[in-house]
Image: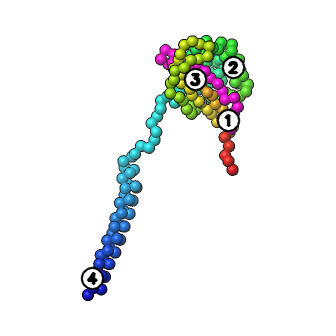
Amino acid sequence: MSLTKNNTIFKIVGISIATSLLFSTLFFFLYFYRIIPILKIDTTTPTDTHFALYEAIINELLDGIQKGEIEAAYNKTSPVFQKKTSLDNFKKMTDELQSSQSIPSSPCTLTEYSEPFSGSIEGLTDTYMIVQTKCEVTENNEIKGFNVEFIEDEGKSKISFINPYKNLVVHKKNP
């Protein structure tokens, strides 16, 4: 009689285990393939408008230089930049950039920017809120880039400093 009771208990335990596994598998399947997609969890990062703003200003300046509209490009820089750099020196700088092929033929992409910080500019007595950025473009497997600083001028961000990378940055895969 005890053998019959043991068989019955084993059957009940076996059926319980099989049922538990079946329903657990069914639950996970439904949860990950049906419920989660319905919830549409947004895993994308929020859009930062500063990236687009700074990138547009830099590319507008570079576009003007590429088109030979040097004076128009110069006029889009901040008054601080214009105090430190005459139009003739700006023309010389753009000539050097073009002859060294530092000006990319396609728009650059802003890769980073700093929070505004208070700082002075060499040769000037005022203090400014400065934002530092980096803008890069890959052409012919070489990265061309610029370090660009912005300051606020009458509520608009304007370029106060631009410096191309001295040497092209080349990224290579390690074998």
Closer mark to the observer between disc 2 and disc 4: 4
Closer mark to the observer between disc 4 and disc 1: 4
The residue under the point 62% across, 13% down is 123
Measured in 3D between alpha carbons, the distance from the residue under mark 4 to the one under mark 1, in whole angstroms, is 78 Å
Circle 4 is placed at which residue position?
5
Q: Is residue 52 above or below residue 93?
A: below
Mark 1: give few (<14), some (14-19) or many (20+) Cα within 10 Å. some
Picture disc at residue 169:
1
Q: Is residue 101 left or right of residue 116?
A: right
Question: Which SS type dominates the magenta stretch?
Answer: strand
Q: N-terminal of the two: label 2 or label 1?
A: 2
Picture disc at residue 149:
3
Q: How many labels were placed on the picture?
A: 4
- The answer, for residue 65, to whether it is visible in the render is yes
The residue under the point 68% across, 43% down is 172
Q: Quadrant of the N terminus?
A: bottom left
Q: Is residue 28 above or below residue 111?
A: below
Q: N-terminal of the two: label 1 or label 3?
A: 3
Boundaries of the magenta span: 150-170
The residue under the point 50% across, 27% down is 115
Measured in 3D between alpha carbons, the distance from the residue under mark 2 to the one under mark 1, in whole angstroms, is 20 Å
Closer mark to the observer between disc 3 and disc 2: 3
The amino acid at mark 2 is Met
The residue under the point 30% across, 86% down is 3
Closer mark to the observer between disc 4 and disc 3: 4
The colouring scheme, among rainbow, by chain, secondary structure or one colour, is rainbow
- The answer, for residue 105, to whether it is visible in the render is no
